[in-house]
Image: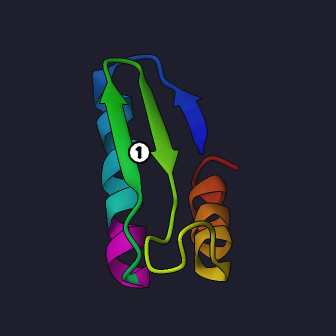
Amino acid sequence: EKAWAFANYFETMAFVNAVAFLAHRQDHHPELLVQFGACVVRFNTHDVGGLSVTDFESAALVDALLA
């Protein structure tokens, strides 16, 4: 789980849409908590009851969005 802060809702939603694009491409979908100037992204693979290699790969792609 990781949280990001943004200046406004528009920037937050742009990030959320980018995460959604990556999730669709990876076919691995995180939980998202979207607020006015923040977003929390949480990966978890229910089939394995915790974190999988795919969770870490997907998290790295999300981190790269704002690197």
Give the quadrant of residue 22: bottom left
Give the quadrant of residue 48: bottom right
What residue do we see at 65% from left, 54% from top? 63
64 left or right, relative to 26: right
Front position in the image: 52 or 38: 52
**Residue 39 point in image, percent of width and height:** 43, 33
**Residue 35 point in image, percent of width and height:** 32, 23
Q: Residue furthest front?
A: 49
Instruction: Please state the total of marks drawn on the protein image.
Output: 1
Q: Which amino acid lies under the numbered mark 1 shown in the image of this protein? A: Phe
Rendered view: 18 above or below 23 = above
Image color mode: rainbow
Rendered view: 25 above or below 36 = below
Give the quadrant of residue 37: top left
**Residue 64 point in image, percent of width and height:** 65, 59
What is the magenta segment's predominant secondary structure?
helix
Front position in the image: 28 or 65: 28
List the residue tagged with mark 1: 15
Rendered view: 14 above or below 8 = below
Segment colored magenta: 21-26
**Residue 40 point in image, percent of width and height:** 48, 36
What residue do we see at 63% from left, 68% from top? 51
Q: Quadrant of the N terminus?
A: top right
Q: Residues within 10 Å of mark 1 (few under 14, many from 20)?
A: some
